Amino acid sequence: MRKVLLLFLLAGTVSCRTPKSVLLPEDGSVLRSLGIKFSFRDGNDRQNGRIVWRSDGQCSKFVFFSPLGQAGLELDVSGEDAVLVNFSRKEHWQGPFRLLLERMWGVDMSLSTLKEIVLSGKVPRGELSALGIFVELEPGPGGAPKEVRLRREDALLTLRVTRDESRPGRVVLAGYAGRYSAAPLESVLEVEE
């Protein structure tokens, strides 16, 4: 009798369990999330770090992590308009993505071109060679490169993709411009260690 009662109790518990809801965007958009380790060299200047890049085709969000694993900077991009946020300084900068990339790593490139290279391995060589940028790709699984090297004069930026995942979803930009004070790009790029 106890076994039968236990079986009924177990069946009742399982049947009353609420199903886990899955929220899918109505437009069917796909969120691509990449983990990237970057290395930049330009003469005596060196930078290394880790970035998480999320993109849904319309918006992108880049989170730059400190060596201790803390989010130091966040870059939100809608189209080619960028907002860079420095959490420790509570400052933000707004401007073209291309200008930010040029200032950070000496690479004069739009977000759409960067996406084309990193997400699908397609290199617009004519456009980039006119800017003095040379691209080398190390192929990865599924057509997307696992390593991208961008060279311009003495500067070398290496992006190594460590994780590449896709799932239904959309990038939601937080709107930091209203919460943090505006500052020049140089100030926002200063990361306190």
Image: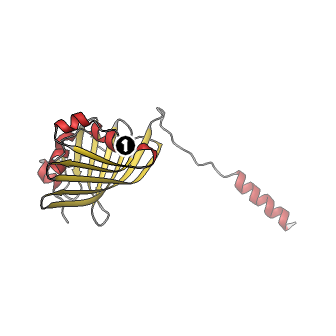
| Residue 95, placed above or below residue 153 | above
**Splitting the image into 4 quarters, where does residue 35 fall?**
bottom left
Observer-nearest residue: 32 or 176?
32
Observer-nearest residue: 70 or 13?
70
Any part of residue 159 in sight: yes
* Render colour scheme: secondary structure
Q: Quadrant of the C terminus?
A: bottom left
| Residue 111, placed above or below residue 179 | above
How many numbered discs? 1
Q: Is residue 84 left or right of residue 115?
A: left
Any part of residue 96 in sight: no
Residue at (28%, 44%) from the top-left corner?
76
Residue at (25%, 37%) from the top-left corner?
125
Residue 99, given in percent of the width and then of the height, sits at 16, 42
Q: Is residue 163 left or right of residue 76?
A: right
Q: Secondary structure at mark 1?
A: helix
Residue 169, given in percent of the width and then of the height, sits at 45, 41
Outermost residue toward the right?
Answer: 1
Outermost residue toward the top?
Answer: 27
**Splitting the image into 4 quarters, where does residue 174 fall?**
top left
Residue 124, given in percent of the width and then of the height, sits at 28, 35
Observer-nearest residue: 51 or 105?
105
Residue 92, given in percent of the width and then of the height, sits at 19, 48
The residue under label 1 is 119
**Splitting the image into 4 quarters, where does residue 66 fall?**
bottom left
Other residues around mark 1 within 10 Å, as few (<14) / some (14–19) / many (≥20): some
Residue type highlighted by circle 1: Leu
Q: Is residue 23 left or right of residue 129?
A: right
Observer-nearest residue: 181 or 93?
93
Q: Is residue 43 left or right of residue 109?
A: left
